[in-house]
Amino acid sequence: MVRPDAKRLCAMTIVNSPFARKLAAFVTLSDSDLTVLSDLYRRRRVFPAGRDLMHQGQTSHPVYILADGWACSYKLLPGGTRQIVDFQIPGDFLGLRSVLFRTADHNIEPITRVEASEVMAHDLLDAFARTPRLATAVLWAASRDEAMVVEHLVGLGRRNAVERTAHFLLEMGARLKLVGIGSKAGFACPLSQYLLADALGLSAVHINRVLRELREDGLLTFQHGQVVFDDLAGLVKLADFDAAYLDHDGPLLR
Amino acid sequence: MVRPDAKRLCAMTIVNSPFARKLAAFVTLSDSDLTVLSDLYRRRRVFPAGRDLMHQGQTSHPVYILADGWACSYKLLPGGTRQIVDFQIPGDFLGLRSVLFRTADHNIEPITRVEASEVMAHDLLDAFARTPRLATAVLWAASRDEAMVVEHLVGLGRRNAVERTAHFLLEMGARLKLVGIGSKAGFACPLSQYLLADALGLSAVHINRVLRELREDGLLTFQHGQVVFDDLAGLVKLADFDAAYLDHDGPLLR
DNA sequence: CGTTCCGTTGAGTGCCGTCAATCCGGGTGG
DNA sequence: CCACCCGGATTGACGGCACTCAACGGAACG
């Protein structure tokens, strides 16, 4: 009986990780790419919900790849309010943007219990040097993250509360579907209305009213930690949602 | 008499460009870095104010480095409104983020007459391969751009009109100072109140009222295309402005 | 000298925030 | 098993920040 190649086995395991899954939507990853990737996954760590794992002003922080759970990045304002910039779901980087700065410019809070792989900046750059294809894929992921931030900005600037909320939930649905969590019908959502409010620039009270309106209009139901798209087409139209920047029919690079 | 080395001369010319000036705030660029940089500047082009030089959905667009003038990147919404994501000033990239996407996800409009160098994506990647230091500098510039977008997002979500406007003008002032245009006292600003409104998620009418309030409170004056910081400390306090992500005391990498 | 763009100001409106009370489910301790 | 507590969800009343509509002045331009 032939014992399977250990590295090969490793690659086979990694291929179903949310991170590889997301990258695979952009580039076709070879076995060697996957092997390099699996090396990055070594230092797995677990964080409890609620306690920040990175905060503004912190110097020389590491980068994480989120393996399980939800997190959010946010900024605090003097008034005591905060603005959530983005939510991170499995497959997303934590703190990639500020890796080139001396200090992190935002906080990251685990919303649920979180499992993440700690990646040394040096190892990441090393991996890039070995597999340019992987480097391209990561750059694409970073561009995609920024595109989401931009879309978020547009929503805050020019969409009313209902459109903004609908757009946000559609985007989360599309992102989750891409990494194999959730479907076109909906997804499990651990976000409280307070978190939603801090992300969408609204008050929790108003979020509640908006969700009720969406529910009564037969568009979507968000109750008991479940988001259900009752009328997907109607939502897409209402929110002017275009998933082009998130999804692709297939890899762009082969 | 010795004729100076042509390449050397080229490097001497480029060192005063806004782009090099901005990068130099982050890394110390060697003569060879500057030579590579000057190669990127070859294809200089001019665009008149007002006509978009890139639009949403456009495929395989080039990247530009802005040499002179102001531009803005924006997204259109179905209602006919638009949201300006960011303004670009000399030294900034145009369209860098969407270079890895098949299609641009936003429009770019020259606000004034604009001079820009067209850079082929291939040449850029080639330059990166030759001088990793330059690659790092460009990545830093990209991270800085994203940090500005994030700060913009925070403003739209959680700052009122006055704070938001003050913060925006302070940020523009800091950016312009970094590339050698404008000073601590103020700067020449070609933006109309309509452009300001589209950027800050407000109506032009309200921008007008906000500017009046800032003026009457002795904080800043924006008239006849000139922004003057009448009370810089007061503005910084009002807007909770922190230029850490824009400016540095000196290069971080030597 | 009309046109157009930009800036300015007033009046009225509405979306969304704040304050406050209530309800509900789950966890905890008696 | 029940009382208590606590975070989150829900709803109502009220107020304010910023929008819309509208009108007018001034400067640039053909």
Image: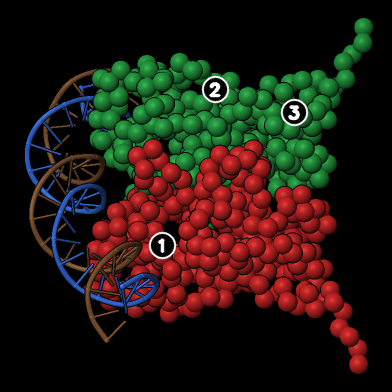
Chain colours: A red, B green, C blue, D brown
The answer to whether residue B86 shows anywhere in this view is yes
Looking at the picture, how far across and down is residue A156, in whole percent? 37, 50
Looking at the picture, how far across and down is residue B139, in whole percent? 67, 43
Under mark 1, the amino acid is Phe
The residue positioned 26% from the left and 25% from the top of the image is: B213
Which image quarter holds the N terminus of chain A? bottom right
Describe the element under mark 2 as helix, strand or loop.
helix
The residue positioned 69% from the left and 32% from the top of the image is: B252
Marks 1/2: CA distance? 37 Å
Which image quarter holds the C terminus of chain A? bottom right
Residue under disc 1 on the same chain as residue under disc 3: no
Describe the element under mark 3 as helix, strand or loop.
loop
The answer for which chain carries disc 3 is: B
Which residue extends farthest top?
B1
The residue positioned 58% from the left and 20% from the top of the image is: B180
Check disc 1 and report the residue beneath it: A168
Under mark 2, the amino acid is Lys
For discs 2 and 3, the disc positioned in front in the rendered view: 3
Check disc 2 and report the residue beneath it: B177
> Toward the viewer: D15 or B209?
D15
In the picture, residue B93 is in which quadrant?
Answer: top right
Looking at the picture, how far across and down is residue A94, in whole percent? 59, 55
Looking at the picture, how far across and down is residue B117, in whole percent? 65, 35
The residue positioned 64% from the left and 57% from the top of the image is: A64
